[in-house]
Image (cartoon, grey):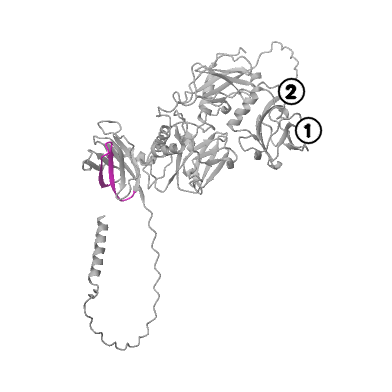
Amino acid sequence: MKKVLSIVLVLMMVFAAVACTSTPAPAANEPKAEEPAKAEEPAKAEEPAKTEEPAKAEEPAAAEPVFAALGLQLKNKTGATINELYITPVGEEKGNSVVLPGWQDKDADKDNYEKFIYIVRPAGVEFEITAVYADGTNATKTSALNMYDEISFKGTAADDWEIEPTKEEDHAAIDLAVALGMTADRTYPGYVAVAAEVKNKTGKNIKEFYLYEEGGDPKSYNNMVQYLYTNTGVKLDTWAPGKAKEGGKYVFSFFLRPEAKTYLIDLVFDDGTTITGESDEWFKPDGDGHQINEISMKSSDDPDTWEYKYDDGADDDLKMPMDERLAYEMTVVGASADVWYPTYGEAPAVDAETLEAARQKLAHDASPLLDNAAAEAPAEPAPEAPAAAAVPEGYTGISLLIKNKTGREIAKVYLYPVGEDKGKNVLKNVVESLPTEDESKEGKPHEAYAYVLRETAKLDAMELCVRYAGDEKEEVTWALKDVLAANTTITLKESMDDWKQKETDDADDLAAMAELAAKGEPTDGVMPEAAAAEPAPEAAAEAVEYTPLGLKFKNRYGKGFKEVYIHATDEDRGANVLTEVLPTEGEGPEDSEEVILFLYRETAKLEKMSVTIVTVDGEEFTWNAPSALGNNFKITVKADINDWSFEEITKEKDLNKIAEFVAAGVTSDGFVPAN
């Protein structure tokens, strides 16, 4: 400022000097001297031609500011509580405080009076350090600051503050703060916060999630899924669809990215399939001045169905309006969704394992309910889907979701084996007719669920016949392209070439299908009678054949298991295979939710096996294995019965453990066949 004032003073003096040498105007009453006769002016000499002035060189563009990482150690020994602390280049606005309100001094809080912080500031400038105390008073000190400096606030007056290099032994803590990358004032020059509530409604478990700017490299950022925790602090191995009570999670957070018009999302699902969606004009406000704050990923194979919109609702966890909740995540919590932060200059070397542990802790501690006593407890897991009713031997229960996007009203739909009678309308006991999508403005009346029984051996060659509404009774027939799955969505469009058949993967649709199947009443009214099998002749004292089963059982249900039974479907469940309560994931030490089992079961009955579970609070439910129960299989129990996994064991340590049981001849339920 002094320099500016001195320049102004010099200019004023120049102007004053010019004014003093100007010719004064004559006084009004002063007599004028007689003007002499004008001499004849000589002819003007011809002026030389003017040379063109060279074009002015363009001024160089202003250099981009260079930002540097600044890791500092702070100590509050003022004897007072500091509510705000600003570290600002001289002459600039204060920006955000680098501490949260209520930072107490050493005498009041010996555990938290000392802080290691990381901030990003222009390189090579002087700073104003301003402390604002709880009583409203403040103090400011001007000083240069360097990496590894310690600011010790030894009194409330700025003259009492000391700035000196921190001890070598404290460099590691500063290095970790800088390498982690989350700044104390939540400021990241050159980057913007892309904040949103993100919903997995794809119907599939997501293994990898990357959000990145158009033209950017998705793998230059972190996989968000590896940093997801439940609201009770349990780490998620995979991101299931739906809300928390359905075994999923809605993510309320932000991503730090270069500002761009378009952002893309890459997903990798548990089954290895991938998909990419994109949003245009993220920061462009809508007609009401709101920008996007919600990403709803509604399909695993059609990103055009994904929604990027403004949600004016509230978050149920913290009872905050959506924009307020996202602002809370950015300014208070500070943990980005994928724990990725930009670096400024060369980041200090930190052991990769230590850095990853710090990232995981940051993501864990950011879970909204961990330290929020006022928030409601997480909801109990949703009850398991009802089991399907008994199906006659040789038949399969087929649950259908039919979507009418043909542009015409549909009167009837038939589903039958190729070359056979088309049978009855599968919508007979569902709807009178199915309107097209264009006629349905609210809800989804153009969609209908149906349940029918069809011969299992003929599911690989089926036809669909659609009769449109109207006097002409026009019918069209379409051959299904794939084997008919037990849960199938069929989408009918204007052109039959665009008709689609796919296995249903939406959680809400699967739940509705399961509820319909549990009633056991085909919607076409056709219940085939099972052929009356002649009783087999009695075997002459033939020994029953048994198969040894090595199983790994994993509990991710959300409750501990008191009892587990593994038995033939529709038969007595036998003995409990657990010797002690099996905790759910996260309740006990690592891997305590897993147990290796060794059993014998009748070979002839392995095609139809069930698992019955009794939880510690008395809840009981049964799951039917989707295929024959074999040796060396892992069963993973999740909150949604439709998400249970059934897969072959591949880990050597698990196979070795099973081999130990086999060698010892000890079974989990005490049963060993006599033969």
Above or below: residue 180 compared with residue 235 = below
Dot 2 alpha-carbon crowd within 10 angstroms: few under 14, some 14 to 19, many 20 or more: some
Q: Distance from label 2 to label 1 (Cα)? A: 19 Å
Q: Amino acid at mark 1?
A: Gly
Residue 636 x %, y %: 54, 26
Q: Which of pointers 2 and 1 lies earlier in the amino acid sequence? A: 1
- Which element type, helix, strand or loop, lies under badge 2? loop
Dot 1 alpha-carbon crowd within 10 angstroms: few under 14, some 14 to 19, many 20 or more: few
Say whether residue 310 is left or right of residue 360. Answer: right
Is 129 one of the magenta-colored residues?
yes
Residue 664 x %, y %: 53, 17
Q: Residue furthest front?
A: 29
Q: Main secondary structure of the magenta part?
A: strand
Residue 301 x %, y %: 60, 39
Check disc 1 and report the residue beneath it: 419
Report the quarter where the C terminus lies. top right
Viewer-proximal residue, 253 or 445?
Answer: 445
Say whether residue 435 is left or right of residue 176. Answer: right
Q: Residue furthest top?
A: 541
Q: Does residue 147 appear in this view?
A: no
Check disc 2 and report the residue beneath it: 528
**Residue 336, numbered circle:** none
Q: Which residues are magenta?
A: 122-144
Asked if the residue at tag 1 contacts the one at tag 2, i.e. Cβ–Cβ closer than 8 Å, the answer is: no
Camera-side mark, 2 or 1: 2
Residue 251 x %, y %: 48, 35
Q: Amino acid at mark 2?
A: Pro
Above or below: residue 102 compared with residue 139 = above
